[in-house]
């Protein structure tokens, strides 16, 4: 009754009182520790719980965490003990290559590799056309001669300017991509005699027409200029490109596009 009177008659005072009460309540609850302070192990710090006073327990000898046995080391590393005692790359596939494996490989390849190597694997993907270091052409003599596990190895560890893809591709997918690259290489030199009886083949031009793409998409293409090779990480000197921001020589905008309005 009293409180209500205070609120109705002197509502301003009542509000202040309510606010103060809330603040006090907040302070009191803020002081409760509950589970905030509790005995626990800190990494790399001592503890009195174990006889050796180490907080972190050493791994138990001769045991392997679940799912980390990796018994088939070739499957996980792409290298195998060679005759001279060193680990070597090999032409072995660690599991049979089925159509399903190739399709998975094609899908992953098209997602992760084509930006630089292009769908046909000539090393002139969109990023390279815009100035990235030319990626390997899978149809040249060097690449054709490399064993299949070399591709697995490059995807696992990266190679020169190429980043590794071990986070994006699980080992089984890396092998599938490697198998697909081999298929891509074989397709580059295939003849009609290689096509199984009863299977229809289409030329790239026919595919382009079906997909409503310009016929030029089916033609081989080249880097816009050799200057890109001279300065692989910029587009300096590329005639098709005009400087966008003269203050930053690394930013170029294709000449055909209008220059963006200056920043305000
Ligand atoms: C960001 C661009 C980029 C992407 C994406 C990329 N690569 Fe590369 N790749 C390169 C470049 C650049 C080189 C040449 C490296 C060098 O010479 O420094 C290369 C080289 C290679 C080589 C040749 C290694 C050798 O022995 O010469 C292989 C094999 C390869 N890449 C496989 C792949 C596969 C498989 C993928 C997809 C999982 C992939 N790359 C994705 C840029 C890329």
Image (cartoon, rainbow, N blue to C red):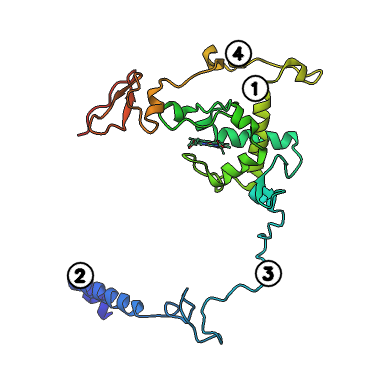
Placement of 109 over or under 62, stated as above or below: above
Residue bearing the label numbered 3: 63
Kindly report the distance in space between the C-alpha atoms of the residues bearing marks 2 and 4.
83 Å
Q: Position of residue 89 (x, y in %)?
A: 66, 44
Q: Are marks 4 and 3 in contact (CB under 8 Å)?
A: no
Which residue occupies 57% across, 46% down?
Answer: 156
Q: N-terminal of the two: label 4 or label 1?
A: 1
Residue bearing the label numbered 1: 188
Kindly report the distance in space between the C-alpha atoms of the residues bearing marks 4 and 3.
57 Å
Residue bearing the label numbered 2: 11
Q: Position of residue 144 (x, y in %)?
A: 63, 30
Q: Callout 1: helix, strand or loop?
A: helix
Kindly report the distance in space between the C-alpha atoms of the residues bearing marks 3 and 1.
48 Å
Residue bearing the label numbered 4: 205
Left/right placement of residue 101 relative to residue 51 reads right
Placement of 77 over or under 199, stated as above or below: below
Label 4 crowd (10 A; few <14 / some 14-19 / many >=20): some
Which residue occupies 56% across, 35% down?
Answer: 111
Label 2 crowd (10 A; few <14 / some 14-19 / many >=20): few
Residue with the most extreme front position = 84
Q: Position of residue 25 (x, y in %)?
A: 31, 77
Q: Callout 4: helix, strand or loop?
A: helix
């Amino acid at each position: 009754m009293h409180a209500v009177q205070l609120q109705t008659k002197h509502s301003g005072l009542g509000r202040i009182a309510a606010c103060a009460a809330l603040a006090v309540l907040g302070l009191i609850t803020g002081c409760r520790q509950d589970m905030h302070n509790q005995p626990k192990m800190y990494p790399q710090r001592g503890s009195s719980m174990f006889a050796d006073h180490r907080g972190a327990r050493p791994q138990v000898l001769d045991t392997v965490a679940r799912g980390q046995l990796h018994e088939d080391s070739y499957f996980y590393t792409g290298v195998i003990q060679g005759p001279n005692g060193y680990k070597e790359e090999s032409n072995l596939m660690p599991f049979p290559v089925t159509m399903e494996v190739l399709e998975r490989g094609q899908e992953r390849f098209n997602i992760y590799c084509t930006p630089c190597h292009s769908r046909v694997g000539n090393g002139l993907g969109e990023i390279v056309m815009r100035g990235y270091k030319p990626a390997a052409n899978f149809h040249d003599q060097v690449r054709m001669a490399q064993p299949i596990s070399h591709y697995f190895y490059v995807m696992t560890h990266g190679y020169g300017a190429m980043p590794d893809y071990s986070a994006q591709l699980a080992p089984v997918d890396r092998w599938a991509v490697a198998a697909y690259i081999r298929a891509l290489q074989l397709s580059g030199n295939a003849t009609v005699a290689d096509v199984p009886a009863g299977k229809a083949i289409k030329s790239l031009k026919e595919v382009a027409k079906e997909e409503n793409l310009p016929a030029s998409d089916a033609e081989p293409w080249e880097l816009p200029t050799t200057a890109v090779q001279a300065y692989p990480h910029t587009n300096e000197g590329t005639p098709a490109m005009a400087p966008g921001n003269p203050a930053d020589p690394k930013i170029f905008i294709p000449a055909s596009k209008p220059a963006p309005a200056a920043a305000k």
